[in-house]
Structure formats: C-alpha cells, structure tokens
C-alpha cells in the first residue's frame, strides 16, 4: 500500500489528505496530520474524497456525435474534429463566436492552458468559469475596496480572532474545516456572530444569531456600522492613515438606525446592538462570508458593506482579523488567478490595460484581443441569440448549476459546436458534439489554490480509467492542433510558464511547494509567500469606503414565498461525484424543499408530501421537508439534484457590477402536487 | 541460535533483516509521508519508528476502508464469482493499543460465524509489534489496560532499548522467523528484560501524568450523565471518529457494475443518519446526539459484554480528528465529576 | 420442481442463532444463485416470488429454515437486502414476498421467471415454534409485515394438532393492500380463526374497518403465545392489548425490522442497543425489547 499526499477535490478549504493505493486502486483516504489546514482532520466529503474515482460510470473513451448518436471515437478524431470546427467557426463568424468555460475543479495548469487556448489560439477573451456564480462580487467589491478580491488572511488566523461575524455562509456544511477553526476560536473565548435567515448549525452554535430577511444584508451591515460609529468604536488612526471616503459613508449610515434596520430586516434592535458591541469592542475581529452574500442582484453592494465594516474597525492586515470570502470549489481561486475570466490575464492583469496586454503579447508571442469577453451567463444569452456558436466546456455542468435551466438548454442546443470534457456523463455532456474523458484529481499532477491563496501540489495516485487523459495534456494537444506551440513535458513545465507571466506566482515552483504549499503573492524565488495581505499598505494605496445603500426589494403577491438555494454537507455542486459516493448519496438520497412548519400548515403540507414549487421561470416537483431551520416565508432547496433542479426556478437577474445571477432570492409559490 | 526466549537485534541489523523479510512478504512499516509517520509498504525508506503512532491504524490491513468482496460475471443469465486471495504480509511496528484492537475485532469478526475475508487476512499476516516507549500526547492506553506494553497477540515483539531492540517471539511463526534469520540476533541477558520493564513503567507514568487518566468503569457510569443533545449540536458529522478508530468496524456493502461488476465493502460510520435509517424514512437513532451516545455505549458496554474487552483501546485518535471539538474525554471527565 | 422429499425432513427449531444451511459457506459473503420459478402479484406494489436454488448442493436452503427467518437477497449490480421467508419449510417452493421500497426491492420485482437472484441465509433466529406447541397461538400482522407471519401460519396449519386455539388478525390500509387473500379459506379449513380489517374501505369491501386492536376486542383470544409483525405503532398497541388479556411478556414475540447489510452480526447497521437484530432477532420477546420499540 502506498500513501500519496494530495489535496481534497471538494471545497475551498484545501485540506491535505493521503490517498491509500493498492494494486493501482484507491482503497482509502485519511487526513494529512501535518497539513496546516486539515491538521489530521477532514470533513465527511474529504474522508470519502476518492470514493467516486473507480466508479463504473467514468467516461473512458472519447465520444463523437455521428448522425445524432454519440459513438466511440479516438482521441485523434475527437481532437482534430474539435480543432477543425473551432477554426471553421472562427473563420466564418469571427473569434468572438467562440468561448471556453474552464473548470474550478481543474488544476491551475489546466486553467492556465485553457485560458491561453481561448486568448492565443481562438483570439477571444470569451473565457470564464464557475466563479462567476460564486465570487465575482468579491473580486469586484473587495478589488475596489482593498485592491484584491481574495481572502485577506489564512484560515489559521481565525484561531486568534476575538469576534467572528459569519454571514451568508453555512460554514459547517460548506467549509467544514473553516467552521472547525471558528468553533475552536469560539471555545477559546471568541464571540461568534452569525447573520443568516436560516437557523443553520452555525447559527445554532452562535453567541448572537441575527436572522435578517433575504436580501437585506446591506441594511443590517450598515446598521451595525452605524452603532459602532455611534459608540466610538471605530479605529480612527486606521481610517485616517490607510483609507479614504469615510465621511461620505458616515453621512449615509446614520440613516440606518436600529429601528430603521428592524423595519427592513426584521432584526430586533437589541440583537443588532449586541452584535455591534461584540464586533466593535473586539481587539481582533474577522468577517467570514460566502455565497449567501454574493449570489444576489446586489451582491457587490453586500461585499462592499462588509468591507466597510472591517475597514472602519481597522480589522485588516493583522493576525486574527480580516475578511474571508469563502471559495466554494477547491480551485476556484486558482482558476481566477490563472485568468480564466473574460477581463483579466493571469494574476488579474486587466486585458484592457495596454501595458498588461503588451506584456502578455510578448510572453505568448502573438497579438491578443483588447476587449473583455463574455461572462458565463452572458455566453448563454449570446448562444441563444446565435452570436456565440462554439464552446469548449471543461468539467462544468451548467445545465444544473447555472440559473434558468431552460435557457441554458436552449443556449447549448443552439450551438453549432460543443465539446465537453468531463469525468462522468452529465446533463451537459448529453448535449455535446464531442465528449472528452479526462482524469480526475486522483489521476493527475498539478496544483490547486485554496480559498486562503495557498498553492498546493495535487499528485497522481492512480492511472486514469480507459483512455482518459489529464486535461492539461488535452489542452496542450489542442493548442498544438490550433497552431500554438505547446510542448510541455509535464505540468511542472506549465507551472514554470505560469510563474513567468503571473507576478503573484513569480516565486512558485513545484520544488518549493512542501507540505504547506505557498500563499501568493509570492513574487520571487526567495519570497516566503504572503499569508496575511495588506499588512503595511494596500495594492491600491489607500483602501476605499463605499457608501452603499439598501436596494428596494421587489415583492410579488403571486409568488409570496422567497426561495433560497444552496448546498448540503453531503453533496458537492451538481452531485456528479458525491452522488456516486455510496455513503454521501445514502445520507441525502433525494432533493427536498425545506419549509417552515407554520408555512407548511397553511399549505396543508406535511414532511414527505410532494409539492410543486413555481416561480415565473417554471416549476419543479419535489418532496417537502418541514424544519425550523428556515424562517417563515422562506423556503430552501439544495441544488445538487438533477431530478429536481432548483435552478429551473432561479432568475438570471444580474448584479450590475459583477454580473452574478441572483440565486439566493427568488419569489416562488408552493402547492401540493396532488392539488 | 539456542532456545532462549529473548534476543537483541542491533540497530544496524534492522534494515538488513527487513530487506530479507521483504523478499518473500509485503513488509508494511511506518515511514514518513509529508512530515508524519504513516503505515505503508516498505521499500527501503527510512523507518519512522520514533514518531508517535500513525494517525491511521494498521488495522486498515485487516479491515480495509474499501475492499472487493467478490466479482460477479454474468453469462447467459447465470453468474460466476471470483474472490481475491489474501496477501502474505508482515506488519512491522504495530503498537500495543492497535494490537489490542485486533484482539477485540477477533472477538467480533473472528467469532460466531467468522468473517471470511477478515479471517483470511488475519491468517496471512505476521505481526511484529513495537512496545511504546514514546507515547503520544493524547494516548491513554494505560487507563484502558491496552498499553504501553503489549501482552500477547503478536508473532514478534520489539522493545527499543536504545542500543538495540529487545526481540521476543510470541508465536510459532515468530520463532520460525527468528530461526530463519538468526544471524541478526544475539541472546539477550536478564538485564535487558529489566531494562524493558523499566522503560515501560516510565512510559506508563508519562501517560498518566500528562494525559487524561480515565477509569473505564467511570466512563461507563458517566455515559448517562452526558448531555448528548448538546454534544450532538457540536458534531459536524464528519464520521472521522469512527473512521479513525482501530476498534470501529461497521461497514456497508454495495454493488458496482451491470451486468458484470464488483460487490464492494466499505467502512461506514454510525454517526451518519443514513447508517440506521430505513427506506421508509424511519430511523431508530434519528438525532446526532443519540448516535453519539450509541457510539460510546457500544465501546464501553456492548463490546465488553460480547468480547470481554473494552471497545476503546485508548489510542486518542478520535479526539485528534474531531472537527466539532467534541472532546470526548473531557466530556466524560465533566460528567464523572 | 423436483426435490428429494427425504431431505425436507424436520424443520430447524426456532432459536438457533444463525442458519447454517448446506451450500452456504458460513461467514462468506458469496450468495448462492436461485432461479425465479413463479411470480404472483399480491398487490400493485407487492409480488410473491418462488425461488429454486440452481445448484443441487444448495437445495437444502430451500427447506432448511424456520418461520421468521430471513434471506439476504441480491440483485447483482444493485445490491443485497434482507427479505423474510414467506413460505413454510413444510411446503415447497421457497417464497419471498417483496414490496417495492427502493432500488433493490424494485430490482427484485423487475425479475422475470427464469431470472437469477442471489440469496444468502437463512439468517436470524425465527419464531420459537417449539415453545409455542401445546399453546394457544395468536398471530397479529399489520401492513407488509404479514409475509413473515404467513410462514408461521402455514407451518402451524401443516402441524395443526400440536397447537391449541390459533387465531390470525391482520390489518392493511385498503382492501387492495391485503396479501394472500386466496389462502384465508385454507387457514380457516385448518381451524384457524382469521380476522381481517382495513383502515380505508371501498365499495366492494364488506369486512371490518378499523385497527387490528378492534378485531382483538371482538375475537377475545385466550392467552398463550403471540407472534406480532407490523409497524411499531401497531405493535405497541397490540402488545398492550394482549398484556391486558393475560398474555405474558416473554410469550409475546415480535419480528423487528432494521437497516441491514450483512445478516451475520458484523456490519452493525441493525443494532438496537446491545442486540443485533440480524442474529439475536429478528424475533424478540416483548420483555426484551418492549422499551426499545
Ligand atoms: C428482517 C427483515 C425482513 C424483511 N422482510 C421483508 C419482506 O419480506 N418483504 C419486503 O418487501 N421487505 C422486507 N424487509 C424490508 C426490506 O429489507 C427493505 O424494504 C429493503 O431493504 C429496502 O431496500 P431497497 O434497496 O429497496 O431500498 P434502498 O432505499 O435503496 O435501501 C438501500 C439499503 O438500505 C438498507 N435498508 C433500507 N431500509 C431497510 C429496511 N427497512 N430494512 C432493512 N434494510 C434496509 C438495505 O441494506 C438496503 O439494501 C425486511 C427487512 C428486515 C430487516
Ligand atoms: S473541508 Fe473541504 S477541503 Fe476539507 S475535506 Fe471537507 S470538502 Fe475537502
Ligand atoms: S474510541 Fe477513540 S481512543 Fe478509543 S480506540 Fe477508538 S479512536 Fe482510540
Ligand atoms: S469526529 Fe467529532 S465532529 Fe466528526 S463525527 Fe465524530 S464527534 Fe462528530
Ligand atoms: S445486518 Fe449486519 S450486523 Fe446485523
């Protein structure tokens, strides 16, 4: 038996684990005791991380559509067809008729090469990935406020916080190892404040639980800030020395009196005050947030409001403080870092910035398009309208994870050409012209960058099944077929190129990535990496306050309930892996809509009753589950289940700044299925 | 070699001895993986014998996290089955607590109707145990009577005396191995045995002074006093406590593949609600707190009734992996006070 | 179906811990193969399947069991689950009565005559028929739990003179959910009193409506041994009723259901306190499990 050290494939915590390998098969997994985040622990998904790897459903040979049917093809056939069709579309309709969707499940090396494929080979900036659906508002909001959209501090830093505000994050279920750190801090005396409409486990364990109405985050955040200013608990020195724009903010937040906040959010003034005191008085306070904050049509405002809070209290740049946007996928941070975004090159160098473009043109030895490309959701619109004609999708299942499933279906079906690379057949591969079988995390070498900016080594433990290949090889192969030089002998050589073009990865190489990896920015070979950002200064000089206001919330009498979506501890994303993991699937075998017992009584619904949940977009049939975890007026559906796709209901209403769709607040109505 | 019952293996002879053994057996030993000792097939790397006992117990070589029970192949409506034979293995450096765990499992998987895959592996494995002269921080084997010195259950027992290892055979297979490789051993003298006893007493004292000293009887009584609902609230349902425990042995069975495929057995945990839930939705242990309580009752009441041994060997691993800060031993201490 | 009658001989006595039928290697997880030889539809979601072991050396499995024992039934590719033996060891063929619940039960029901299923067992202790002999016997079933009781009823019917008064009470949700309706006549012919009731009646139903306990009030069975199987609610109510009639706790036998994976006391899924339902049960007397159900 061999024990291979690698990184968990699920959430952004980036836990280190060992895969136990015998005779070319993975027979177990266990936590890496010396890893800085896992420290010998894992969540249930981590313990079972490799369970799906040898599942018989794995895609093992390339498939090519012939006369309407998918038939086995060779790699050469599949790739030459892909290259030929992409080229033809480019020649007929121009480069912007093409797009690449990379994967947050892929390695940095894969994301880099695929983004390069879009820009260098296809000459388009139409490249994006799932981050659009998670943290685009963080990139936009924190980018504006602090100069970087990433988590400011390492996870470990939470252990020394005196107060921790968690909002829009079901941490115990989505980022269990971060929750473990928060709970550890709490047992050492830190005050835990949780703002969440649902009574999640985190909320139940909190010292103070605020339960705002859905979509009213700016109001209570401003309200807390107002109280903190009122009580004189702001960090004046910090504000004066390191920030700008405080006065305008101060003038605005006075309107957010506890009474006004209660009217908007439903939070009792006493609780708001308690939270303000705990956060304001703490020597070191931290804000932790996730998709419950960002997936709103006002997602960027929500992030800016939270940034105001940490800046006004001087909680940036020190151990135990900071703002922590929790990344969902294990490598969504890395995919962003690698420039798998329509507006930036690796390392967040803007495509519109001529100097950055010149640098990249020199490095890549070709001309590059100057205009930012389409975002993921815009791509779907463009495809539906026929402007976009060919897409290469890597390990993504937009049919389940994107809002407005019907539209995604129309969009993908109206494409002239679609190639999908994945490890399992999905609702999306079913629509493809070419399906490429690729290696899972346990079958390839590379790096992942966790939510705390830690770049870590992923190692091949077993061979891919059948003819499946690591996507880094596939991307290089495609690059060559499209006339771009790409002779990488190994992923390590790709990393060497990444570090040469990405300033924040400048000092990163495989030799240097030990047990703990390295946190970027790590600009040079002798740089130790940066665990805490913004210690002496901000990349933008002074940090910026923004006076953000609570938006009016539309109400619809026909759809009196508010639907929010999310994930369960036992599943990940669209469930292609977790639903093929015996113990995880058994734990949550089917979808259910969580309804407060009071709402359920009014609807005549019991636990187990089949109900129809409808929004203006459509309806789904699903089992009801009665629970006090959701407040009255709110219902909750996890989005992992293809047979009850929650995103059939959600709207594409986009946040104007970051273009994130609003997945967290959809007006719906519910009736019994038999009525 | 005479018929003496204890020998000395010089430090420098250890690797040559293992090399000889590895010619015919798969030798499993603790080696360094990413900064910590872990049991893996030994291929000549430096041994990590001075580290604390690895987080993953060598019990995984008897009850793997995942194994193929059999393969089925369908041919015109009928099936033929095939099973893999167990491998010949030598586990080097197994600690007394894990050895005790093996004895407990013998009382469960080896008793009544013996579990055939387990029994096969048991028969084909040679155990070279290592007495614990360097106990880990969370160890409380002494309280459970399972360490720091091993009492039987091994083929060969080693104790690190500094200048070399004291070697004591514990079975005919052990004697056979010592004979076959006699040139590495020299006879021990009575002083060596005394030295072993002194070191073990020292280790025992160390465990008692720094670790939690718990009386199993007290724990048994304390189970009723614990607020299980509260403990359940903090549990993050990672299942780690069961998956890491050398005595936990529950499993699930599943098929993969149609029409040909494999029937797999995988480690399971009673912490998950699906473990006891029935298809209709009824669950005899619906709340996390109830499931945690059952976990303890099994270890401290039911397993002892069945095997005469505690279902906990005091390795401290479950506290180490717990995500929810469900610090079980302080839980008991509080309840016991 | 051909089988050497002499092999059928005596019935295994209840109370054995685990069946050790010929052909099944004790402790092995390898099933034997059995062919589906007949399928009866008992209700819209319940089928009665007759099975015949395919290898001659496994034939004893089909007769060497006692009422109340169960099999682990495999559909290869879907898995294995516990199913009570619905036939009596005194009669051929071996039968199981399966109600659609999840994937595996659906798989079993999808089998057609001639298809092969895997079986392991028989497992569990079975009803203590030995100690029931010479006594009055009351058999009370609710819902799909009736399959295991049918085994006991037919066993008693084939050995009727050894038992005193025998009464069967059985309740289902609707008349369509009643199993083995064609056999009630033969039970009555064997001098077994049969009371049937449903929760919800329809136009065609002329029988009783209400709970099993209401039948008990009507029939007023004399104390003796009792065998119960059904939903926990019904079991609690019937047991309470019987205790009020002079039945004693150690003679009220209950067949329990738990999540099961191995059937041989190893996997721990079926634990109920200190008991393994698969090996210590599934039949328990009320004095042992009264406060656990
Ligand atoms: C002693 C005993 C006798 C039984 N006799 C019968 C019978 O005669 N007829 C009949 O139709 N049903 C019987 N059942 C119930 C039957 O076992 C379950 O309905 C069946 O396991 C559901 O499996 P599934 O694959 O269809 O459902 P899934 O939901 O897919 O179940 C998956 C697995 O969970 C376990 N499981 C889930 N529910 C149960 C349960 N209620 N009992 C045991 N294991 C479970 C099994 O291991 C099963 O393989 C009996 C159960 C027990 C314990
Ligand atoms: S917390 Fe996240 S990274 Fe860690 S084991 Fe769980 S899913 Fe994997
Ligand atoms: S219960 Fe905990 S301490 Fe006891 S043997 Fe299991 S893992 Fe070790
Ligand atoms: S290790 Fe702790 S958190 Fe995990 S299941 Fe056990 S008690 Fe719960
Ligand atoms: S079914 Fe496995 S122990 Fe009972």
Image (cartoon, coloured by chain):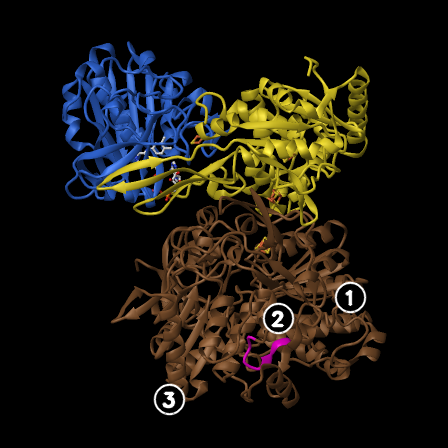
* The furthest residue to the front: B183
Give the residue pinned by disc 2: A217
Which disc, if any, is residue A280?
1
The quadrant the C terminus of chain A occupies is bottom left
Cα separation between marks 1 and 3: 60 Å
Q: Chain of mark 2?
A: A
- Which sits earlier in the primary sequence, circle 2 or circle 1? 2
Above or below A587: residue A261: below
Residue B300's x, y, as percent? 61, 27
Q: Chain of mark 1?
A: A
Q: How many marks overall? A: 3
Give the residue pinned by disc 3: A92
Q: Colour of chain C?
A: blue
Cα separation between marks 2 and 1: 18 Å
Q: Colour of chain A?
A: brown
Q: Is residue A221 visible?
A: yes
| Magenta highlight range | A340-347
Identify which residue is drawn at 23% across, 13% down.
Answer: C9
């Amino acid at each position: 038996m061999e024990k291979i050290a690698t990184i968990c494939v699920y959430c952004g915590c980036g836990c280190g684990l060992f895969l136990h390998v015998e005779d070319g098969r993975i027979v177990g997994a266990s936590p890496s005791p010396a890893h800085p985040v896992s420290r010998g622990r894992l969540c249930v998904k981590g313990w079972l991380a490799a369970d799906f790897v040898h599942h018989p459903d794995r895609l093992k040979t390339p498939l090519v559509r012939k006369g309407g049917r998918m038939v086995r093809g060779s790699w050469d056939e599949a790739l030459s067809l892909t290259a030929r069709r992409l080229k033809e579309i480019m020649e007929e309709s121009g480069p912007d008729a093409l797009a690449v969707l990379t994967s947050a499940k892929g390695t940095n090396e894969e994301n880099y090469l695929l983004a390069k494929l879009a820009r260098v080979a296809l000459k388009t900036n139409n490249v994006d990935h799932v981050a659009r659906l998670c943290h685009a508002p963080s990139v936009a909001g924190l980018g504006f406020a602090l100069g970087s959209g990433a988590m400011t501090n390492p996870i470990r830093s939470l252990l020394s916080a005196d107060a921790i505000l968690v909002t829009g994050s079901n941490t115990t279920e989505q980022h269990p190892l971060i929750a473990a750190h928060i709970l550890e801090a709490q047992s050492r005396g830190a005050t835990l404040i949780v703002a969440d409409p649902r009574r999640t486990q985190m909320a139940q364990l909190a010292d103070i639980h605020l339960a705002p109405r859905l979509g009213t985050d700016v109001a209570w955040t401003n309200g807390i800030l107002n109280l903190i200013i009122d009580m004189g608990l702001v960090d004046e020195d910090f504000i004066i020395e390191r920030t700008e724009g405080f006065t305008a903010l101060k003038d605005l937040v006075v309107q957010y009196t506890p009474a006004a906040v209660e009217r908007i959010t439903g939070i009792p003034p006493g609780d708001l005050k308690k939270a303000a005191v705990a956060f304001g008085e703490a020597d070191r306070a931290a804000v932790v947030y996730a998709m419950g904050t960002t997936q709103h049509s006002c997602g960027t405002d929500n992030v800016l409001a939270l940034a105001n809070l940490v800046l006004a209290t001087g909680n940036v740049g020190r151990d135990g403080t900071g703002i922590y946007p929790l990344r969902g996928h294990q490598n969504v941070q890395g995919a962003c870092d690698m420039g798998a975004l329509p507006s930036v090159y690796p390392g967040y160098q803007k495509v519109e910035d001529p100097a950055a473009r010149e640098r990249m043109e020199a490095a890549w030895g070709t001309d590059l398009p100057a205009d930012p490309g389409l975002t993921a959701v815009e791509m779907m619109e463009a495809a539906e309208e026929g402007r976009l004609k060919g897409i290469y999708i890597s390990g993504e299942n937009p049919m389940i994870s994107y809002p407005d499933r019907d539209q995604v279906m129309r969009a993908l079906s109206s494409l002239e050409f679609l190639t999908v690379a994945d490890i399992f057949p999905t609702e999306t591969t079913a629509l493809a012209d070419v399906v490429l079988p690729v290696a899972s995390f346990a079958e390839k070498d590379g790096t992942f960058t966790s939510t705390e900016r830690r770049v870590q080594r992923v190692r091949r433990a077993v061979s891919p099944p059948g003819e499946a290949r690591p996507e880094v090889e596939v991307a290089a192969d495609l690059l060559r077929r499209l006339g771009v030089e790409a002779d990488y002998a190994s992923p390590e050589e790709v990393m060497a190129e990444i570090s040469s073009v990405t300033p924040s990865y400048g000092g990163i190489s495989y030799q240097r990535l030990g047990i703990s990896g390295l946190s970027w920015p790590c600009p040079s070979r002798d740089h130790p990496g940066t665990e805490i950002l913004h210690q002496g200064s901000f990349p933008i000089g002074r940090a910026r306050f923004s006076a953000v206001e609570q938006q009016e919330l539309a109400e619809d009498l026909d759809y009196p309930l508010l639907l929010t979506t999310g994930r369960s501890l036992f599943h990940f994303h669209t469930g292609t892996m977790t639903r093929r993991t015996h113990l995880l699937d058994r734990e949550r075998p089917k979808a259910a809509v969580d309804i407060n017992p009071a709402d359920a009584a009014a609807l005549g619904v019991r636990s187990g009753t089949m109900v129809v949940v409808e929004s203006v977009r459509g309806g789904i049939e699903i089992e009801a589950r009665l629970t006090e975890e959701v407040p009255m007026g709110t219902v909750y559906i996890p989005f992992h289940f293809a047979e009850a796709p929650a995103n059939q209901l959600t709207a594409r209403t986009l946040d104007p700044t970051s273009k994130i769709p609003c997945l967290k607040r959809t007006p719906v109505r519910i009736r019994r299925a038999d009525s | 070699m005479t018929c003496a019952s204890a020998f000395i293996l010089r430090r420098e002879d250890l690797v040559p001895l293992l090399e000889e053994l590895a010619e015919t057996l798969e030798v499993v030993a603790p080696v360094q993986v990413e900064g910590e000792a872990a049991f893996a097939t030994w291929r000549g790397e430096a041994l990590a014998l001075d580290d604390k006992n690895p987080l993953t117990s060598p019990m995984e070589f008897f009850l793997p996290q995942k194994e193929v029970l059999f393969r089925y192949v369908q041919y015109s409506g009928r099936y033929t089955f095939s099973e893999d034979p167990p491998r010949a293995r030598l586990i080097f450096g197994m600690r007394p607590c894990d050895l005790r765990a093996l004895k407990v499992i013998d009382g469960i998987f080896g008793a009544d109707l013996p579990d055939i895959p387990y029994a096969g592996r048991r028969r084909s494995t040679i155990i070279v145990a290592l007495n614990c002269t360097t106990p880990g921080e969370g160890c409380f084997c002494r309280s459970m009577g399972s360490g720091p010195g091993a009492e039987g259950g091994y083929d060969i027992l080693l104790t690190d005396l500094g200048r070399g290892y004291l070697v004591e055979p514990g079975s005919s297979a052990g004697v056979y191995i010592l004979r076959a490789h006699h040139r590495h051993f020299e006879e021990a003298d009575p002083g060596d045995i005394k030295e072993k006893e002194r070191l073990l007493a020292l280790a025992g004292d160390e465990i008692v002074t720094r670790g939690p000293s718990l009386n199993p009887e007290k724990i048994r009584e304390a189970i009723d006093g614990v607020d299980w609902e509260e403990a359940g609230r903090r549990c993050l349902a990672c299942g780690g406590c069961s998956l890491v425990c050398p005595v936990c042995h529950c499993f699930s069975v599943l098929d993969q593949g149609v029409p040909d495929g494999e029937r797999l057995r995988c480690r399971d945990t009673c912490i998950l609600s699906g473990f006891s839930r029935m298809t209709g939705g009824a669950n005899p242990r619906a709340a996390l707190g109830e499931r945690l309580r059952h976990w303890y009752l099994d270890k401290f009441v039911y397993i002892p009734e069945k095997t005469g041994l505690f279902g906990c060997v005091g390795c401290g691993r479950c506290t180490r992996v717990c995500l929810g800060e469900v610090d079980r031993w302080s839980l008991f201490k509080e309840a016991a006070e | 179906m051909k089988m050497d009658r002499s092999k059928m001989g005596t019935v295994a006595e209840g109370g054995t811990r685990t069946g050790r039928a010929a052909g099944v290697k004790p402790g092995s997880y390898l099933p034997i193969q059995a062919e589906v030889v007949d399928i009866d539809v008992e209700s819209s979601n319940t089928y009665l399947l007759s099975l015949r072991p395919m290898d001659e050396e496994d034939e004893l499995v089909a007769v060497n069991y006692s009422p109340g024992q169960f099999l682990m039934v495999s559909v290869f590719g879907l898995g294995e689950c516990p199913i009570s033996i619905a036939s009596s060891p005194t009669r051929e063929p071996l039968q199981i009565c399966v109600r659609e619940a999840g994937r595996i039960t659906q798989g079993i029901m999808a089998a057609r005559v001639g298809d092969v299923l895997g079986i392991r067992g028989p497992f569990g202790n079975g009803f203590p028929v030995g100690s029931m002999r010479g006594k009055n016997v009351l058999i009370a079933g609710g819902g799909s739990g009736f399959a295991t009781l049918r085994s006991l009823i037919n066993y008693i019917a084939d050995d009727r003179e050894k038992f005193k008064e025998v009464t069967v009470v059985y309740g289902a949700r609707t008349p369509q959910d009643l199993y083995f309706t064609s056999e009630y006549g033969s039970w009555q012919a064997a001098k077994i009193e049969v009371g049937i009731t449903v929760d919800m009646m329809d136009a065609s139903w002329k029988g009783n409506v209400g709970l099993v306990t209401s039948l008990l009030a009507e029939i007023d069975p004399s104390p003796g041994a009792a065998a119960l199987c059904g939903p926990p609610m019904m079991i609690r109510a019937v047991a309470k009723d019987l205790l009020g009639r002079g039945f004693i706790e150690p003679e009220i036998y209950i067949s329990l259901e738990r999540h099961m994976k191995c059937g041989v006391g190893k996997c721990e899924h079926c634990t109920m306190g200190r008991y393994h339902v698969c090996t210590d049960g599934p039949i328990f007397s009320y004095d042992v499990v009264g406060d656990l159900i």
